[in-house]
Amino acid sequence: MFPRLQGNQRTLAQLVALVVTLTFTTIVIIPPFYDWFCRVTGFGGATSVAEAGADTILDQTVKVRFDASLEQGMPWTFKPVVHSMDIRIGETGLAFYEAHNPATRPVAGTASFNVYPYAAGGFFTKIECFCFTEQILQPGETVQMPVSFYVDPAMVTDEEGRFVKEIVLSYTFHETPLPEEQAALPTAAAPNAGAVN
């Protein structure tokens, strides 16, 4: 690999090549693979995504609790509108979270999410969610953001999932850079300040 280098120079070049390879693998290859793995298996509380509701609705119910938090420095307030609901397994549920921007500037945010217990993660399926896209709130703006979901009936026959009686859906909002066109707008021109959508 390094035919012209000898001794310490050859060892140093090999170490540099190893570090570059490991860095590339860690930054470029592992995160997408890990994300895919979590979504397929539900590992770490990752959820599934579907375009429509479940084909089967069971009589068995599960309680879904809703949790909200903010990354440090995120100026919004953020909370679930309803803190919990009982839902039949397979039934499509609809919940809302409310966010408010008290800052004097537009603020963009993206929500990360988790499901607990982890055994329920692969069975908790989102159809639509505010977490799929970046949200931008103007100064003083308040919005209610929906998430529609169902719990896959396959959970009741899963070795661990069948013991789940309560699921916690948790979101954390992180501030993200404003899109260039939004950042260029003067604050006074912000539309819908104080409106609830």
Image (tube, rainbow, N blue to C red):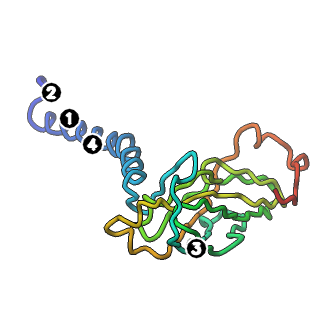
User: In the rendering, which numbered label is found on residue 13?
Assistant: 1
User: In the rendering, which numbered label is found on residue 65?
Assistant: 3
Q: Earlier in the sequence, mark 4 or mark 1?
A: 1
- Give the secondary structure at mark 2: loop
* Residue at the image position 48 percent from the left and 57 percent from the top: 47
Q: Nearer the viewer, residue 85 or 34?
A: 85
- Give the secondary structure at mark 3: strand
Q: Earlier in the sequence, mark 1 or mark 3?
A: 1
Task: Identify the residue position indicated by label 4 in the image.
Answer: 19
Q: Position of residue 37 (x, y in %)?
A: 36, 50
Q: Nearer the viewer, mark 3 or mark 4?
A: 3
Disc 2 from disc 1: Cα separation = 8 Å
On the rendered structure, is 127 left or right of 119?
right
* Residue at the image position 67 percent from the left and 64 percent from the top: 95
- Quarter the N terminus occupies: top left
Residue furthest out toward the top:
4
* Residue at the image position 51 percent from the left and 57 percent from the top: 56
Q: Position of residue 128 (x, y in %)?
A: 62, 51
Q: Nearer the viewer, mark 2 or mark 4?
A: 4
**Mark 2: amino acid:** Phe
- Give the secondary structure at mark 4: helix
Q: Earlier in the sequence, mark 2 or mark 4?
A: 2
| Image height of 74 relative to 187, above or below | below
Q: Position of residue 194 (x, y in %)?
A: 87, 60
Q: Position of residue 117 (x, y in %)?
A: 43, 71
Task: Identify the residue position indicated by label 2 in the image.
Answer: 2
Q: Earlier in the sequence, mark 3 or mark 2?
A: 2
